Image: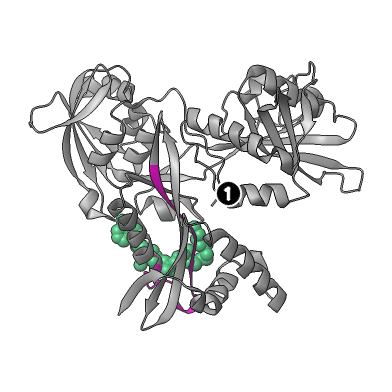
Amino acid sequence: MRQIRELTSADNEALITIMADAYPGMNIVTEADRVRFLQRSEQIVADTAVTNWGLFDDDVLLGLMRLFDFTMTLHETAVFVGGVGSVAVGLAHKKQKVARDMIQFFLRHYRERGAALVALYPFRPDFYRQMGFGYGTKMNQYRVKPASLPHSGMDDVVFLTGGDRAVVESCYDRYAAQTHGMFVRHDYTWDAVFSDSAMRKVGVKQNGRIEGYILFTFQPGKAGHFLSNDLLVRELVYETPEALAQLLTFLHRQADQIGRVVFQNQDDSFHYLLHDPRLDDELMLRPTLYHETNVQGLGLMYRVVDVPRLFGQLADHDFGGQTCRLKLTLHDSFLPENAGEWVIGFENGRARLLTQNDYDAAIELDVAEFSSLIMGTADFRQLIAYRLAAVSDTAVVETVTRLFRSWRKPVCLTNF
Ligand SMILES: CC(C)(COP(=O)(O)OP(=O)(O)OC[C@H]1O[C@@H](n2cnc3c(N)ncnc32)[C@H](O)[C@@H]1OP(=O)(O)O)[C@@H](O)C(=O)NCCC(=O)NCCS
């Protein structure tokens, strides 16, 4: 009989064996590796917001996952969101629907605890889309010559030490509270940032306050010799144009030492900043005259697990200033209790669920696309074009598109 329960230290040996096999890239081979892994794992789950869970069959651990309690800024409101990571199934138990059972447990666990949304980083986007997770914002990677970055002054740029941790955290917290998609950061992540000597930390400090900062590491450059180095920006947070300008000036001035500054961000307008936005001098998108500027990847995925609660959480959100009554039919084969029909009344952009059954327009779609729509990463008009959503009357496509169009796509700087 299958049972899913929280893991205790008595399960450590079985946990390490499954993790070592599921993630060979983690290099958990020797006894010393196992001890190091366990120490890090125990440090993380010491945070009460993080728990390890396992699926057992007759007391044998077949698979495990780590659950995270997050607070996320959903448009303008802080909401409780569940996260899952480290999903791993024993080599001998693949394709026995262990992952399916664990993910269903994860969804119900957070639904019961009051979340309307959950999130995860997929090892394969299609695997989780089938389970109802919708695509989040794409990540862009720009590889920029330092000289391409704007430069002005950098009078307030300082290297940050452990003594600055509280003011750096405050800067992150203010930015997270203002930015759709951002997660409140757990302490263990800051512990890792400030104990990692390879992670350089530079901030703009004015009157004791951090207005913006970058975390960066060096990585070998293309030429492959010790003088050839790139600079990988691991995190860039800024609250003012002035702070960003100073941080970019700091990076600009590394031109003699650094081949490329590598940015990974969810900012689709980043190329406006660059003197030369081309990714490489020669790469063109043939046969057109378009210059390659960046590469993109899909990562974080979101999933709605409770529709009425979601609209309750979004009571203060402005759905495009629209006024209409919309019938929503949601399909959810993976979490059937989340499927259903609702009539939502929008008045000057404010939404509330209605009990009456008359409406102006009806839409029908799967929870994966609905989740992307709610997060502001999908465009309703395109979902119709791709036949990923249906609408009662094509005349209302523009209205529905405006309802869900977000002026800002979600940004997330939390890995889990
Ligand atoms: C990836 C991994 C977790 C998959 O585990 P698994 O237990 O073999 O996967 P499952 O057997 O549960 O497969 C998922 C099932 O959910 C089912 N499923 C998906 N969506 C469904 C839906 N909407 N309704 C019903 N069933 C659904 C699928 O059909 C699939 O079953 P099938 O293979 O019989 O079609 C496992 O291979 C692993 O540990 N890999 C290494 C580590 C890793 O990459 N982890 C992922 C981190 S995100």
Residue 78 found in image quarter: top left
Magenta range: 80-98
Q: Which of 207 and 271 is in front in this view?
A: 207
Q: Is residue 398 left or right of residue 13?
A: left
Is residue 82 or residue 329 the one in the foreground?
82
Where does the image place residue 275, in percent across and percent down from the top left? 74, 19
Question: Alpha-carbon neighbours of circle 1 within 10 Å: few (<14), some, or many (≥20)?
Answer: few
Residue 364, position as x, y percentages in the image = 22, 37
Horizontal relation, residue 160 to residue 312: left or right: right
Colour mapping: one colour
Quadrant position of ligand 1: bottom left
Which residue type carries mark 1? Asp
**Quarter the N terminus occupies:** bottom left
Q: Is residue 30 visible?
A: no
Q: In this view, does 139 lie to the left or right of 84?
A: right
Residue 125 visible to an observer of this rendering: yes
Residue labelled with disc 1: 187
Query: Splitting the image into 4 quarters, where does residue 327 fall?
Result: top left
Q: Is residue 153 magenta?
A: no
Question: In the visual, does 68 lie left or right of 333?
Answer: right
Identify the element where label 1 is drawn: helix
Seen in the picture, residue 88 relative to 356 is either above or below; the reply is below
